[in-house]
Amino acid sequence: MFPGSLSPVTPVQETSKDKYMTQVAEKPAVFGNALEKRPTGGPRWLDDLRGRGAAKFAALGIPTVRDEDWRFTNVSALGTIDFAAAGPISGAAERLNGYAYTDAPLRLVIVNGKFDTTLSRTKGLPSGVVAGSLAVALKDHADVVQRYFGQLADFTSRSFDALNTAFVQDGAFIHLPDGAVLDTPIHVIFVSGAEGASVMAHPRTLVVAGANAQATVIESYIGVKGETYFTNAVSEVFVGENAGVDHYKVQQESLEAFHVASLHVHTSRSSRFSSHSFALGGKTVRNDALAILDGEGGDCTLNGLYLADRERMIDNHTTIDHAKPHCGSHEVYKGILGGTARAIFNGKIIVRQDAQKTDAKQTNRALLLTDGATINTKPQLEIFADDVKCTHGAAIGQLDEDAIFYLRARGLNYAEARDMLIHAFAGQVLDGVRVQPLRDALEVELFDQLAKDLAEVDARKA
Amino acid sequence: MSMLDIKNLQVKADGKDILKGIDLHVNAGEVHAIMGPNGSGKSTLARALSGHPEYEVTGGSITYDGKDLLEMDPDERAREGVFMAFQYPVEIAGVNNSYFLKAALNAKRKHHGLAELDAMEFMQLVTEKSTLLEIDKSMLQRAVNEGFSGGEKKRNEIFQMALLEPKLAILDETDSGLDIDALKLVAGGVNAMRAPDRAFIVVTHYQRLLTYIVPDFVHVLSGGKIVKSGGKELALELEAKGYGWIDAA
């Protein structure tokens, strides 16, 4: 049932691995010292995995723009900063203030990669449901963790997954046994950064939902304004047969932070998975979302909304792998860019030979508020089955002048007309958020940020 | 009372001179029909009146309600009571029709120093106005014009007009593409709004509309100029003879 048992999809992947190999020599050795001082302990298999992750990262290095998957995303700056593993920081509780829905009744707080028991709230979980520290789960739920951990995050070809694997120590673990239904969302909050130091964190999340289980998981990434740090997160989500998982990611890192994250999802027969990603912060951001639809009749939604201004950069790479027949996937990614911000969207859809009756739809739209903003967008369809429905569309541009005129012709002034259109643009993704307090908080945060961006655009025009 | 006074209006669009000196006087309470062959400049006149940025006024003047209309932005014109029913109403994804109408109505009310309508008052008004045009509630909850049929779009335009109660309403080929039932609905909506303090400019290619909206004056536009003006009987004459004789004259 695990993707590890699936045959490789295309020879393309093999060649790209070869390409990595040939470039090893050209890549600078980074995190070298840190790698030597990587965490140890825990079960033997984990220590072994860390060692393999470290070796693989040392070989792969930080991707360069010569790597196809990083063509437009220059993360070389990561190699120029001597990031240290973060120790405990004071005032972590205060750091939660002012971010979306951090007062959730069920929350797991991870500070610089380490689970914080005092800040976390796990009272009221239904019996059998586990939500807590990954480090603790390695002891208390060793069998479940070992069975699922690392099954999706491929460290053999993915640099940052390898780096994360090398540093695995703690994070969040959520396990729902068969039939468990959790009505209250679990909010996993990753607090990163430290005063006056450049730190890095490699948090890890493992979510396992058994058959017929149902849960909502929110991952938030937050950091204090002005702090430079590096978050390198890996999440693995397993959705059991006929189970449903709604996943939200709210990225509100400091505007000086590096944020690299990959979300790996595995779905089973008749299961439902949805992901809603909101990227509001970070200076250099890379989000990967990879879903393998590995059971008949599954349904997967990957939606995203990203905002970037100034010189910020945000890259979204998604892969939906239809491995079994009769699965549906729906994908809407939208971006709003100002300043000289850059965005990249790459949406890959794979339909394997057996995946007949696949219904895949991908839409990707970006709104450029300034002349200096840019986006590179690429749909990538690899279809090996013949009875499938796959559609994709991309639209990039400014606001529709006809629509603006129409609204003005009804009495709204230019700014009102523009705001109404931008809100409508973002609203389509926002409306997918089914956790009301999160939706409300996101709406305020989004539109506050947009108002600032638009005021800047107006100031420059005036 | 004079509502609109257009003098020697010249308008350029897409680098071409389209209107080459239009004179038109409209009093409150009157309905003026503008007819003419394709490309004569009918829609250009309507769009220039609404302040469309792609139509550049290169000469002449427009006085509306004693004020210089050309000095006003499109939205100010709207708030001052000028309404244009679009020939091709624009689809606006993600903007709820009802939300949009409320925003438009309140923008106008604010401009005139009136209190904004709350949700309850707004719904009352909507219910009252929607019956006449057979606008059903589901249409209000959809995105503006998105997925509307041609007839629904035009009805939605006239519905907006009914809500916004303009002083000067310009209908830009509102009848084009409508079947007879939709045409009757639209015409009924317009007729219900005819009032001594309101004027209409009805731009149309077909005489058919004018059997339902009976104009006080008919003007024939050709080559960017008004070449003939008359009463409602002129429309019938055009229907019988076509536009050919105008160009020849």
Image (spheres, rainbow, N blue to C red):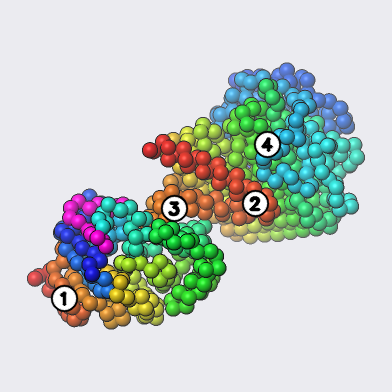
Picture layout, residue B24 above or below residue A321: below
In the rendered image, residue B137, in percent from the top left (x then y), is placed at: 53, 72
- Residue that carries the numbered disc 1 in the rendered image: B230
- Residue that carries the numbered disc 2 in the rendered image: A439
Same subunit: marks 1 and 4:
no
Alpha-carbon neighbours of circle 4 within 10 Å: few (<14), some, or many (≥20)?
many
Kind of residue at disc 1: Gly
* Dominant secondary structure, magenta: strand
Residue displayed at 20% across by 75% down: B217
| Outermost residue to the left | B249
Kind of residue at disc 2: Arg
User: Can you tell which mark lies on residue A324?
Assistant: none
Query: Which one is in front in this view, the residue at disc 4 or the one at disc 3?
Result: 3
- Residue that carries the numbered disc 4 in the rendered image: A222
What range of the chain is rendered magenta? B52-66
- Residue that carries the numbered disc 3 in the rendered image: A417
Same subunit: marks 1 and 3:
no
* In front of the other: B78 or B157: B78
> What is the quadrant of residue B182 in the picture?
bottom left
In three-dimensional space, the C-alpha distance between marks 2 and 3, rounded to whole angstroms, equals: 23 Å
Residue A55 placement, left or right of A175: left
* In front of the other: A332 or A306: A306
Same subunit: marks 4 and 3:
yes
What is the chain identity of the residue bearing mark 2? A
Same subunit: marks 2 and 3:
yes
What is the chain identity of the residue bearing mark 3? A
Kind of residue at disc 4: Ile
Residue displayed at 37% across by 78% down: B192
In the rendered image, residue A116, in percent from the top left (x then y), is placed at: 81, 35
Q: Earlier in the sequence, mark 2 or mark 3?
A: 3
Same subunit: marks 1 and 2:
no
Kind of residue at disc 3: Ala
